[in-house]
Image (cartoon, rainbow, N blue to C red):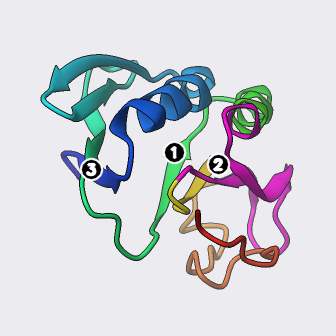
Amino acid sequence: MIEHVSLRCSDSKASRRFYERALKPLGYRCDMKYGDSFGFKDEAGRHDFWVTAGKVGTPTHVAFLAPSKAAIDAFHAAALKEGGKDNGEPGPREGYAAYAAFAFDLDGNNVEAVLWESAPAASGRKRPAAAGKRKKKVARR
């Protein structure tokens, strides 16, 4: 089990606002601060996601498990409203049994909200890079 993931961001306060709103429908809230780092707590009380100021490197892909399709729709709408760029509208994903949405955050990281229709191992889940259709890359700011 992963204990936590931390993304470097060019502006931790702007990233905090982006993730506060985008992750709220998924049950996350930001309630911890250490310097320029902000910790997000899931509904189980784990601070497993952090954003922190620093040199932004190669963009990464982070996926959050969603409780419902409605939460995924709300995640995607909030991410775009807060300055994120669309990287895949909410909907079923071709090639694997999931409903998902994708958005690039303010630093170009690919953020996903996903709800599996069945256990991934039982559904013949493909590797993330091969799963579903991707839109054209959006230039990083």
Residue beneath disc 2: 114
Percent from the top left, x then y, of residue 29? 42, 18
Whether 88 is drawn above or below 30: the answer is below
Mark identifier at residue 125: none
Q: Residue at x 37, y 52 (%)?
A: 10
Q: Which stretch is magenta?
A: 79-106
Q: First in sequence, mark 3 or 2: give its number.
A: 3
Examine the rendering and report whether any part of residue 101 can be seen.
no
Quick one: label 2 or label 1, which is nearer the N terminus? Answer: 1
Report which quarter residue 73 is drawn in. Answer: top right
Q: Is label 2 in a helix, a strand or a loop?
A: strand
* Residue carrying label 1: 64
- Going by the picture, which residue comes out furthest to the left? 34
Cα distance, mark 2 to mark 1? 6 Å
Judging depth in this view, the residue of 73 and 44 nearest the camera is 73
- Identity of the amino acid at label 3? Ser
Q: Is residue 63 left or right of residue 94?
A: left
Q: Nearer the viewer, mark 1 or mark 3?
A: 3
Marks 2 & 1, CB-CB < 8 Å contact: yes
Local crowd at mark 2 within 10 Å, few (<14), some, or many (≥20)? many
Under circle 1, the secondary element is strand
Label 3 neighbour load within 10 Å: few <14, some 14-19, many 20+: few
Residue 15 vertical placement versus 127 (above, below): above
Q: Nearer the viewer, mark 3 or mark 2?
A: 3
